[in-house]
Amino acid sequence: MKQKHYIIRGGEEGRARLLVLSRVMRPTTLSLLNRAGIRPGMECLEAGCGSGDLAFGLAGIVGPSGRVVATDIDEIKLKLARREAEQRRLTNLEFRLADIVEDELENFDFVHARFVLSHLANPQKPLEKMWEAIHPGGILPSRILIFAGISAIPNALHSHATSNYIPRRHSGGGQIRTLGRGCRDFL
């Protein structure tokens, strides 16, 4: 895959920004993953992994009997993440240059995306692709940003919230268990 333009600052500067975001979001993200049903032995996809911080956590949760494939479109951040995974001796974690919008996905037990869909002009196609990449009984939790509005008084504060979305793919059909609002209308 050819390196794509990354709308948010990428590379090493982007890595520093994502480290801060990851530290702030870690407790609520781990809570979401646990509520969604992540467990040892699962095969996971982390779509839009950025600097890989959440992928490192997933690799620890699924353990040596599980596997994590983490994808992003920023090769510089992926190289940094690969180096860190090697330093941590994580053998169950692979970082790939891939675009969730265009590239094909293999099948997984657990497919996760944090804020990725919020950055896309048309999140329906990648959400459908992620849904199709889940084994029957698999899980697709996603966290999206919902911009509720902008206020110019007093300090041009931006108001936003996050929404958690946890569908579970059943072998018997399209039953969905969901927390939060938003993306479920796509499926």
Image (cartoon, grey):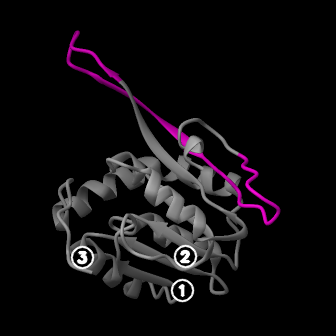
Camera-side residue: 184 or 152?
184
Q: Which mark is residue 75?
A: 3
155 lies above or below 69: above
The residue sitting at 33% across, 76% down in the picture is: 81
Disc 2 to disc 3, how far (Cα)? 20 Å
Say if the magenta span includes residue 50. Answer: no
Q: Quadrant of the N terminus?
A: bottom left
Disc 2 to disc 1, how far (Cα)? 6 Å
| Mark 2 residue type | Ala
125 lies above or below 46: above
- Rendering coords of residue 36 (x, y %): 68, 55
Residue placed under numbered mark 2 in the picture: 59
Q: Secondary structure at mark 3?
A: helix
Q: Mark 2 or mark 3: name the one nearer the start of the chain.
A: 2
* Main secondary structure of the magenta stretch: loop
Disc 1 to disc 3, how far (Cα)? 20 Å
Which residue is at the far right? 172
Q: Are marks 2 and 1 in contact (CB under 8 Å)?
A: yes
Q: Mark 2 or mark 1: name the one nearer the start of the chain.
A: 2
Quarter location, residue 37 = bottom right
Residue placed under numbered mark 1 in the picture: 92
What span is in magenta? 149-177
Q: Are marks 2 and 3 in contact (CB under 8 Å)?
A: no
| Mark 1 residue type | Asn
107 lies above or below 179: below
